Amino acid sequence: MGAAAWRWALRTARLRGGGGRTLLRPRCPPRRGPVACSSPFVESASLGSRDEAVRDKRAQILSRGLPKQKPIKGVKQVVVLASGKGGVGKSTTAVNIALALAANDSTKEVGLLDVDIYGPSIPKMMNLKGNPELTPKNLMRPLKNYGIACMSMGFLVEETAPIVWRGLMVMSAVEKLLRQVDWGQLDYLVIDMPPGTGDVQLSVSQNIPIAGAVIVSTPQDVALLDARKGAEMFRKVHIPVLGLVQNMSVFQCPKCNHETHIFGADGVRDLAKTLGLDVLGDIPLHVNIRETSDSGQPIVISQPQSDAAKAYLKIAMEIVRRLPIPPP
């Protein structure tokens, strides 16, 4: 079938009505003045009026503003850890930073919320299993280990069960994790965000007040492209970016102690300069970090004197130093 025949077939299909009859619809609005409807002046005026209507509608939507942020009951300050790209060690960093916040100041109560619906990893890293108990008010009680209160979708589904949900179900789950958990009294709630800049990130950012965001990335160029998008997203929703964490910055051979920059050197530092942000710290690529996370004994707890643990402790101190004064 030639191009002309295809155009005729498509036009006929668009004009077909019920019962197979052809609808004779006018190709332009009725004439209302001395200018014919085929005149380009009428077409231009029609387009202009439609554009004006779209602008008015958009102005009405924007005038409503963003959803009013409602604090999480009992939580003083929320810190989110995010990354534009997956696989950069964000969850491992979130776990160890939460533990480091508590280790640096034993008077502080710290919680850890995993909003990565499709790939929750906090239960394994924190060595937690089981279903949350319910309070008399039908709120979920977080599971606790190493002094950290934890909540994750991984507590609500089987460990091997895939979560095959559409967006609306995911957003409903995020809403429950934010609003139907009894955290008690927390000084800090660390939120482990999923990778990317999608619905979950936007929903969390717009629905609860966030004291600051931390961007985690490796020095690799591909990861830095997405890390920049993550930082820009938080700026657009008026959330202060406390700084960047350069993860897997250097690998030291355990036999000869030779250092190799597997993912590149100082890529996160260069990005931080471009964005006008600080680098909160560097975390090495070390087998002990991976092994302790897989075994449910994070390195800040199991090897507190190691260089890797000290790196997390330093980053936690830098985060606290940059946070605003918490409400009374």
Image: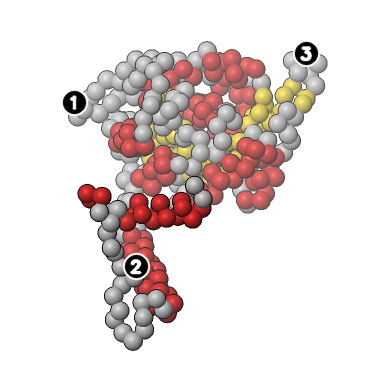
Percent position (x, y) of residue 88? 59, 30
- The numbered mark, 2 or 3, whose residue comes first in the sequence reads 2
The crowd level at tag 1 (other Cα within 10 Å; few <14, some 14-19, many 20+) is few
- The numbered mark, 2 or 1, whose residue comes first in the sequence reads 2
Left or right: 235 as drawn, with respect to 128: right
- Give the Cα distance between marks 3 and 1: 56 Å
**Closer to the camera in the image, 76 or 236:** 236
The crowd level at tag 2 (other Cα within 10 Å; few <14, some 14-19, many 20+) is few
Dot label at residue 42:
none
Left or right: 49 as drawn, with respect to 100: left
**Closer to the camera in the image, 317 or 142:** 142
Dot label at residue 27:
2
Dot label at residue 136:
1
Percent position (x, y) of residue 13? 35, 51
- Which amino acid type is marked by label 3? Lys
Percent position (x, y) of residue 189? 42, 34
Q: Which residue is mark 3?
A: 255
> Which residue lies at the image location 40% right of the left edge and 16% below the top edge?
159
Q: Quadrant of the C terminus?
A: top left
- Which amino acid type is marked by label 1? Pro
- The numbered mark, 3 or 1, whose residue comes first in the sequence reads 1
- Mark toward the viewer: 2 or 3: 2
Q: Secondary structure at mark 2?
A: loop
